Image (cartoon, rainbow, N blue to C red):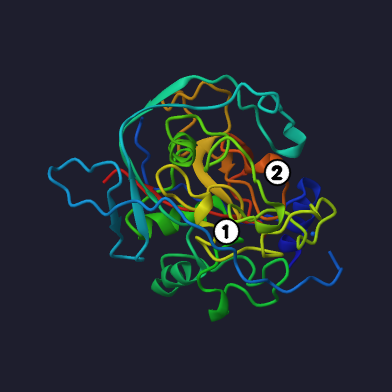
Amino acid sequence: MKKHAWMLLLVLAWMLPAACIPRTPEAAVPGVASSTPRPADAPRPTGAAPQPSVVTPTSSVPQLGEMRVSGTDLMEQVYIPAGGFLMGSNDGDAARETTDMHDHSEIPLPTVFLDGFWIDRFEVNNGQYASCVDSGACQPPYASSSDTRPQYYDNPEFADYPVIWVNWYMAQDYCQWADRRLPTEAEWEKAARGTEGYRYPWGNDFLTDPLANDRANWCDVHCPREIASSGWYDGYADTAPVGSYPAGASPYGVMDMAGNVWEWTTTIVSLYPYDPGDGREDLAVEADRIWRSGPWNNGIWYLRTTVRHFSPQWYWFVNLGFRCASTK
């Protein structure tokens, strides 16, 4: 009990709750907060999404648009082909480096080349994570509630909502159990913005109709935070079911790459340009690791595809989840 109380004080000092005894991960990476009554969840928005076509492979090399389904957790995965993409940004927001707020610089804007890889089409949900826990390969999340729901993780009503309260080690364990791994931040950004360097997964323009936000779950009128944007509506006061905003899909058809929950990556926080060989992809080092995506309880700034947030890898929080990737 004394140990947990001490860790709670450490969490409050950082503004995020955290506790975990670090372990050395085994998987390898390739080189390349309110007491105000909360409104009930509203029906989810609808909209058309660019759907990846299911391509029948004609060679041993997967093709653009090809999809597959994991035999372990039934996760849909989308293939991102090899090639270059613009990583980072040169706009006015990109130079922000407020380490006390856990954001990091997004400049400059080099072209980064990656091998082809697969990435989960959706964030890992509660039901999928529970299967890993049941198998004995994963620890339960550090809390079973969400911000507005006393019973969340272990409630069948929220089985298709993103798992939260997991640290980097727990995310690594899940991906290894599912025969995958966490994505690097470079892989995550390419899957989110494509090769055209989009500011948001759906393009360079934000939202056109504040009352019909069908692209992302962020801190709108329902959000129980002081920063809530009263003129915007996305249907949820908290997390949303994965894939609820199809019109906000990335150029590859990957969902929820803006909003809903932050997502862990393998990458140690470092300045650009991105170089996987400079130590930032060392899984054996205990370090601050990059988060991507932006969560349901932050504002518009955090919906950009280039935003880099970070924390020690043993942190967990109410808005932090993950998805997996693979080069197999």
Q: Looking at the image, which is closer to me, 154 or 230? A: 230
The structure residue drawn at horizontal position 46% and vertical position 57%, both measured from the top left corner, is 122
For the question of whether residue 101 can be seen, the reply is yes
Q: Position of residue 321 (x, y in %)?
A: 56, 56
Disc 1 is placed on an element classified as loop
Q: Looking at the image, which is closer to me, 265 or 136? A: 265
Q: CA distance from mark 1 to mark 2?
A: 24 Å
The structure residue drawn at horizontal position 63% and vertical position 47%, both measured from the top left corner, is 294
Marker disc for residue 166: 1
The answer to whether the residues at label 1 and label 2 have Cβ atoms under 8 Å apart is no
Q: Position of residue 276 (x, y in %)?
A: 43, 28
For the question of whether residue 256 can be seen, the reply is no
Q: Is residue 30 left or right of residue 297?
A: left
Amino acid type indicated by mark 2: Ile
Disc 2 is placed on an element classified as helix
**Looking at the rendering, in which quadrant would you find the N terminus?**
bottom right
The structure residue drawn at horizontal position 46% and vertical position 65%, both measured from the top left corner, is 138
Judged by depth in the image, the label closer to the viewer, 1 or 2, is: 2
Q: Looking at the image, which is closer to me, 298 or 173? A: 298
Q: Position of residue 91 (x, y in %)?
A: 65, 23
Within 10 Å of the Cα at label 2, are there few (<14), some (14-19), or many (20+) other Cα atoms?
some
Q: Looking at the image, which is closer to me, 57 or 207? A: 207
Name which quarter of the figure residue 34 lies in: bottom right
Q: Which residue is mark 2?
A: 300
Name which quarter of the figure residue 32 lies in: top left
Relative to 121, say whether 95 is above or below.
Answer: above
